[in-house]
Image (tube, helix red, strand yellow):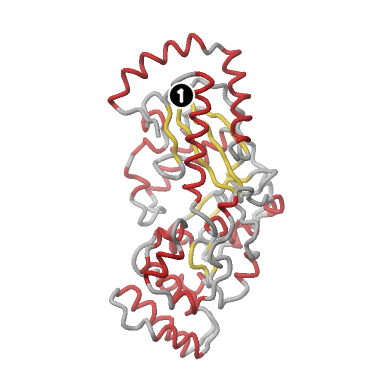
Amino acid sequence: MRSWRPSILPRLNRLIPVMKLRLNPDTLAQLRRRLDELGAELGFQQVGVTGVDLPEDEGRLLEWLAQGRHGGMAFMSRHGTKRSRPAELIPGTLRVISVRMDCFAPDGRPGTEVLADPELGYVARYALGRDYHHILRPRLQKLASRLEQEVGPFGYRAFVDSGPVMEKPLARNAGLGWIGKHTNLINREAGSQFVLGELLTDLPLPLDSPASDHCGSCSACIPACPTGAITAPYQLDARLCISYLTIEHHGPIPEPLRPAIGNRIFGCDDCQLACPWNKFAQLAADPGFRARNGMDAPALVELLGWTEAEYLSRTEGSALRRLGYLRFLRNVAIGLGNAPSSQQTVEALSSRREEKDSTVREQVEWSLKRQLSPSTD
């Protein structure tokens, strides 16, 4: 992907003045309309354009970091203000082109049904198919290439949750939706079941209007969170969030939080399932989002029996691969600890008691104790 590397900066700096002379306001407005057409052709449900200033969001980010609510995600603070200032991250950035794509698996078993069956493992619905990074990134590259055909070479860099970019505030400012009380982006026509990507660019495109908030008095998402991670409207403590705990967190998951995790082995959708706007969620048109390998409703006992080779094979090209085998086993073992007591579950857990990894061993023992001495939480 094209980026502002030192070796090409002089070339880009010579091109930019020429482009500015050629791209007058009428031409830029026409290009903005063309951007919508190109986005639709490439499978994006919406495209928006915003500037680079995020002062209020930066303040909230810095306060969130100061409170330690990012948990073990040290990368959230590693780049300083570059995360909230795109023009510092990629010098020369004038605009951010934000895109969204529906990711609701068209063939997945309903999430509420899977959550209601404690013998099944729940995977966040966005992760049932192919890793969305691999779906969006090539399309963003094609979008940039098509724009180059329209205006000639220009500076850009694509991001799909792949760098220090505040994608939700940028998408909000680009008119793609508002940030709900659960801190996810919501669109009036599509709920929140979509994924985002960005092109940081030096094209001085016209700005779109930011989306307005339509949560109103609704707060259904807040009590829906199993671990109380939504501590107040628009405030999330990642240290309590099941998505963070099952995906980003390394090592043992704190014992007090384990019962509330239930059968969720990769991420959590509870706050989105409770959101009334998701009655408008659209099924993904891209076949890459179709569920793979039965991961829309897998049996926990079977998952714990997977060898590392089976795990690598069945999660190839999937977001689940980012867990790694050991965290995968840890999460599945938690699910079995929360499952109804059965001989089959005890046998499955017992088969993992000699694992080399101390986190997996400890988790298995905790789950076995619950299986052999069931109690109410």
* Residue at position x 41%, y 73% in the image: 255
- Say left or right for 283 vs 347: right
Q: Count every numbered label the image shows and give the total.
A: 1
- The kind of residue tagged 1 is Leu
| 123, above or below 351, in the image | above
Quadrant housing residue 82? top left
164 relative position to 213: left or right: left
Q: Quadrant of the N terminus?
A: top left
Between residues 18 and 333, which one lies in front from this camera angle? 18
- Where is residue 5? Give x, y as percent: 31, 28
Residue 94 or residue 64, whichever sits in front: 94
Residue at 42 percent across and 11 percent down: it is 17
Which residue occupies the foreground of this view, 285 or 361? 285
Residue at point 57%, 60% (across, down):
291
90 versus 121 height, above or below: above
Which residue is tagged 1? 94
Residue 335 sits above or below residue 197 on the image: below
Q: Position of residue 151 (x, y in %)?
A: 51, 18
| Disc 1 packing (10 Å; few <14; some 14–19; many ≥20) | many
